[in-house]
Amino acid sequence: MIDSDALDRRFRGESVGRALDLVGERWTLLILREAFFGVRRYGQFVRNLNVPRPTLSARLKTLVDAGLLQRVPYAEDRDEYRLTQAGLELFPAIVVLMKWGDDHVPDPDGPPIVLEHSTCGKAADAYLACRCCGEEITAHNVKAYPGPQA
């Protein structure tokens, strides 16, 4: 028999679910993508994303309140939005989603954005790797263990 209390604890503390509660909405991820590629001003977000202004305002407020973006004044009565350290740490997630989209739901004309690694000048091909041994991490070579909250 399934222990419903244990299952409830598992899902209540589940990290992916908590992250998606914050960034899982479509416009939020697109706003973050734009911020990674240098967009900072409200009008630029509106123009690049064709997002309704009330939606953009609400999403930017959520991202600022969550500490992923910060509002920085750049002119009288004007702010821009800059990624915080916590926001910057989402870059790998955006890159992996971008690669997955290019591989599994490709645009017939090819990828709309290609990343180049500044150090070597080659196309940046994102993948997960173990920090200890450098081996690529896949769904087939990791195990999940209960954490402190389990």
Image (spheres, rainbow, N blue to C red):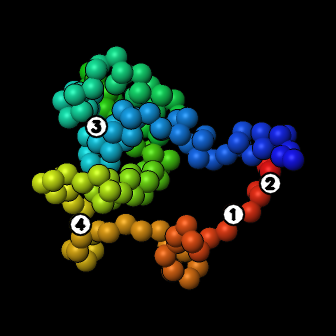
What amino acid is found at the position of numbered circle 1 in the picture? Ala
Q: What residue sits right under mark 4 in the picture? A: 116
User: Could you tell which of marks 2 and 3 lies nearer the N-terminus?
Assistant: 3
Q: What residue sits right under mark 3 in the picture? A: 40
User: Could you tell which of marks 3 and 4 lies nearer the N-terminus?
Assistant: 3
- Neighbours of disc 3 within 10 Å: few (<14), some (14-19), many (20+): many
Q: Which residue is drawn at 87% across and 47% down?
A: 1
For the question of whether residue 54 can be seen, the reply is: yes
For the residues labelled 3 and 1, the Cα–Cα distance comes to: 38 Å
Q: Is mark 2 on a helix, strand or loop?
A: loop
Residue 111, quarter of picture: bottom left
For the residues labelled 3 and 4, the Cα–Cα distance comes to: 22 Å
What amino acid is found at the position of numbered circle 2 in the picture? Pro
User: Could you tell which of marks 2 and 4 lies nearer the N-terminus?
Assistant: 4
For the residues labelled 4 and 1, the Cα–Cα distance comes to: 33 Å
**Residue 137 in the image, given as x and y percentages of width and height:** 52, 72
Q: What residue sits right under mark 2 in the picture? A: 148
CB atoms of marks 2 and 4 within 8 Å: no
**Residue 123 in the image, given as x and y percentages of width and height:** 24, 70
User: Could you tell which of marks 3 and 1 lies nearer the N-terminus?
Assistant: 3
Q: Is mark 1 on a helix, strand or loop?
A: loop
In front of the other: 104 or 86? 104
